[in-house]
């Protein structure tokens, strides 16, 4: 195999680093034709979950509605299913995992905030249910319709409005792709404060609506902190312009916080102003092999102590996850370490290479001497860094290729984090459904250890009620028992709405309903999701 | 059957993945605050030296990594030692002054000092793409040269090396001592492991200046200017993704 061709794709899965050449590596899903073929087999959500009933108060969209929408929007803004072009709407109706499928016949792609406002005003008046949609990379079925809700896509709201290179404040439309924004900021020596595997496809509006976490949460914090202002269109068509570029503003209730993480149930985010950090001059990546989860925790403590302000990511995965990557992952190069029960990826980012190198090697040396870590490698150049990251970032996609994947994204106290994986494995083994040639093929644990966030992925031959029953609500009950969160960063969407009670008390849920009712009285914004029925 | 002592050349260059820019004065590529690392072909050369030792453990008695350049070149020597080189030599000189002929002369001086019988260099550095140092060094030493190596075999004191040439692959044989330059497909370099990085800290690194070696590195070539290539022209543009999709449908591509 020609190695030069191999040299680029394997090693250049770009994570935003100092002056990295912008590569258009879009988060690669299946090639289009295979995707559509696979997707045709996805069952309708309405058929799979017959207990969800279409709300009869929502208007069915008629030709009259479509003529009106065509008149208020610019050219090519509407896609209407006319019987012959149904495949054009597939990508808007099916989620990334191929788990959910809606029946929307109308997709609207406004080109400006004013167009969004006109559309929502009309939908509010006529009681047409809508689903706001960005990159459609969500993992809890929150971004696609359940029945015939109209999809309002932000795909055409993709302008970067301004960037202040002194303060590092970016103002842009909600439909800008995260990776595109990051590349733009790279030219000025800045970076987006979040990074996730879907960066080539996800849009920043969706990131804000789901309060996305990602790989650098440890260092740059939550969007609740880095978002400075929002421009939101409310369900009655009102445009709320809170697009400040101020770092500090304590005047009144901080309304933007309501919309961050609201998953499209209170309004549509059309514009964002966000504070961006300086791109680090010195980045280091090391991958370590460890014998036990206790060692992983010790390594984390030591890293926090020794690396302190330069620590920018602390990820872990178990051997089962690595094995899955070796079977289905797109990174075909050899993993540089031998077989260990656990692996950790440490990344440091700072302004001084010598200082960072010294801190990192000293920290790793003491971990090695104390036998907390059994072995490890440190990347010597950017290509090696990207290669190492791709072993961690490739895990979700590898799970997806392994079959039907049940994904759980849980926040737990770090000491019991891995116990969930062990208990789940035992439960599934005891049931006789897990193992070679059985319905359930892999159970893997990985995630952002630094944030106490476990990703538990269970792959099965297909999505199946019996398999689901084995896993749920056991996984949520387990989480509730340890006062964890049933959704650390993925959100509630359709998948977890009914389990909200495991993480939030009744009075809290009641107050959420009250807010929803007062902002969206007709309930047209992303119905059937987010709050339990 | 003699002992094999290998000298490997290492150059600190701007990292392969970095987007380069021309400096404001248009005299060179901007190197300030830009990530640097070991030249990829030199990394392959180091890896090959270590693999030769793995294949012939009783014969390879020494692997020396040599770098000519500014003080920061020591970084790439540490990488080379972490990959398996036994010791390192750093000839400290201003990067901007060094050109292939002077580097070849410095290498010759070190070869006369250390007496290796196999020199492995990367085929070219990714900053100047000169592809000259290995050839010039062989000429100065009067040694055989096998360039663009994609496979190296040593039997007794004979080298059998496959080279990549325009027409395909060519296999040459030669006796030691010789100069080999490494091409991309020679091997895939290993990661530097923690234990080896720790050990590398204790390995010896000796520094010389060109004066110590009696080499005159006065540049013989002068760079007049450096400019970016003209932006790409041609190709049609479409107004939107929808237009692209319809154009693709028109030609039957979708």
Image: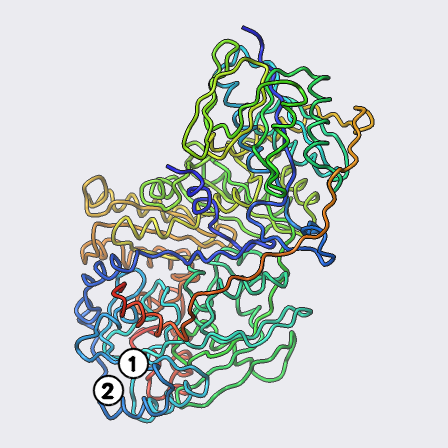
Please report, as a chain letter, where disc 2 is located: A
Dividing the picture into quadrants, the one containing residue B61 is top right
Residue drawn at the location 40% of the way across and 38% of the way down: A2
Between A164 and B26, the residue placed more toward the observer is: B26
Query: What SS does tag 1 mark?
Result: strand
The reply to whether label 2 and label 1 mark residues of one chain is: yes
Quote the CA–CA distance across marks 2 and 1: 8 Å
Q: Which mark is residue A61?
A: 2
Residue drawn at the location 60% of the way across and 55% of the way down: A19
Please report, as a chain letter, where disc 1 is located: A
Percent x, y of residue B125: 60, 38
Task: Name the image quarter holding the C terminus of chain A.
Answer: bottom left
The mark nearer the N terminus, 2 or 1, is 2
Between A280 and B48, the residue placed more toward the observer is: B48
Percent x, y of residue B20: 61, 53
Q: Is residue A170 left or right of residue A52?
A: right
Query: What SS does tag 2 mark?
Result: loop
Q: Callout 1: few (<14), some (14-19), or many (20+) C-alpha neighbours within 10 Å?
A: many
Q: Are marks 2 and 1 in contact (CB under 8 Å)?
A: yes
The image shows a total of numbered marks equal to 2
Instruction: Check the image and name the residue furthest to the right.
Output: B211
Task: Name the image quarter holding the N terminus of chain A.
Answer: top left
In this view, A479 is above or below B131: below
Q: Is residue A262 left or right of residue B141?
A: left
In this view, A490 is above or below B142: below
Q: Which residue is mark 1?
A: A150
Percent x, y of residue A507: 41, 76
Dividing the picture into quadrants, the one containing residue A29 is bottom left
């Amino acid at each position: 195999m020609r190695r030069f061709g191999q040299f680029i794709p394997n090693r250049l899965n770009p994570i935003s680093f100092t002056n990295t050449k912008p590569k258009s590596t879009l988060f690669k899903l299946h090639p289009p034709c295979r995707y559509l073929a696979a997707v045709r087999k996805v069952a309708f959500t309405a058929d799979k979950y017959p207990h969800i009933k279409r709300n009869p108060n929502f208007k069915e969209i008629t030709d009259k509605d479509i003529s009106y929408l065509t008149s208020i929007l610019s050219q090519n803004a509407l896609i209407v299913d006319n019987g012959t072009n149904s495949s054009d709407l597939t990508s808007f109706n099916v989620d990334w995992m191929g788990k959910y499928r809606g029946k929307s016949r109308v997709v609207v792609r406004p080109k400006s905030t004013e167009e969004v406002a006109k559309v929502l005003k009309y939908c509010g008046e006529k009681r047409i249910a809508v689903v706001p949609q960005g990159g459609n990379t969500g993992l809890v079925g929150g971004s696609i319709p359940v029945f015939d809700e109209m999809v309002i896509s932000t795909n055409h709201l993709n302008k970067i409005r301004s960037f202040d290179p002194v303060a590092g404040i970016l103002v842009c439309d909600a439909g800008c792709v995260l990776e595109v924004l990051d590349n733009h900021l790279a030219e000025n020596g800045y970076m987006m404060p979040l990074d996730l595997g879907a960066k080539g496809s996800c849009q920043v509006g969706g990131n804000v609506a789901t309060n996305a976490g990602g790989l650098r949460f440890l260092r740059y914090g939550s969007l609740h902190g880095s978002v400075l202002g929002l421009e939101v269109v409310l369900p009655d068509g009102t445009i709320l312009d809170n697009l400040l570029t101020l770092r500090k503003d304590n005047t009144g209730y901080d309304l933007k916080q309501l919309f961050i993480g609201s998953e499209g149930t209170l309004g549509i985010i059309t514009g964002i102003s966000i504070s961006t950090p300086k791109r680090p001059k010195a980045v280091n990546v090391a991958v370590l092999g460890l014998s036990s989860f206790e060692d992983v925790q010790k390594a984390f403590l030591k890293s926090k102590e020794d690396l302190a302000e330069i620590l920018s990511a602390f990820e872990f995965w178990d051997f089962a996850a690595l094995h899955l990557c070796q079977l289905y992952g797109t990174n075909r190069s050899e993993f540089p370490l031998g077989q260990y029960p656990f692996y950790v990826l440490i990344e440091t980012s700072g302004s001084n290479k010598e200082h960072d190198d010294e801190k990192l090697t000293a920290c790793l040396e003491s971990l090695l001497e104390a036998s907390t870590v059994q072995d490890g490698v440190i990347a010597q150049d950017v290509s090696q860094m990207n290669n190492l990251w791709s072993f961690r970032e490739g895990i979700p996609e590898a799970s997806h290729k392994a079959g039907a994947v049940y994904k759980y994204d849980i926040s737990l106290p770090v000491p019991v984090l891995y116990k969930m994986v062990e208990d789940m494995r035992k439960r599934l083994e005891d049931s006789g459904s897990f193992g070679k040639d059985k319905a359930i093929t892999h159970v893997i644990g990985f995630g952002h250890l630094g944030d106490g966030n476990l990703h538990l992925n269970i792959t099965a031959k297909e999505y199946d009620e019996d398999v689901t029953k084995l896993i749920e609500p056991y996984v949520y009950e387990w989480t509730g028992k340890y006062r964890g969160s049933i959704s650390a960063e993925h959100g509630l969407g359709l998948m977890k709405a009914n389990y909200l009670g495991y993480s939030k008390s009744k009075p809290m849920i009641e107050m959420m309903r009250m807010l929803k009712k007062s902002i969206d009285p007709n309930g047209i914004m992303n119905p059937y999701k987010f709050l339990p029925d | 059957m003699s002992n094999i002592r290998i000298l490997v050349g290492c150059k600190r260059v701007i990292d392969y993945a970095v987007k380069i820019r021309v400096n404001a004065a248009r005299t060179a590529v901007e190197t300030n605050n830009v990530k640097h690392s070991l030249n990829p072909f030199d990394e392959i050369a180091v890896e090959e030296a270590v693999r030769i030792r793995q294949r012939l453990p009783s014969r390879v008695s020494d692997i020396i990594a040599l770098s000519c350049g500014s003080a920061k070149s020591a970084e790439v020597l540490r990488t080379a030692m972490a990959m398996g080189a036994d010791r390192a030599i750093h000839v400290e000189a201003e990067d901007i002054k060094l050109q292939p002929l002077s580097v070849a002369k410095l290498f010759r001086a070190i070869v006369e000092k250390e007496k290796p019988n196999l020199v492995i260099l990367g085929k070219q550095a990714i900053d100047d793409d000169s592809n000259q140092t290995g050839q010039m060094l062989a000429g100065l030493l009067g040694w055989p040269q096998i360039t663009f190596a994609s496979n190296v075999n040593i039997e007794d004191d004979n080298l059998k090396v496959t080279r990549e040439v325009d027409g395909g692959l060519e296999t040459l044989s030669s006796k030691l001592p010789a100069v080999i330059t490494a091409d991309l497909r020679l091997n895939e370099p290993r990661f530097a492991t923690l234990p080896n990085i720790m050990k590398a800290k204790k390995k010896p690194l000796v520094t010389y200046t060109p004066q110590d070696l009696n080499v005159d590195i006065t540049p013989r070539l002068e760079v007049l200017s450096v400019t970016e290539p003209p932006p790409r022209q041609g190709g049609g543009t479409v107004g939107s993704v929808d237009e692209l999709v319809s154009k693709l449908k028109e030609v039957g591509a979708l």
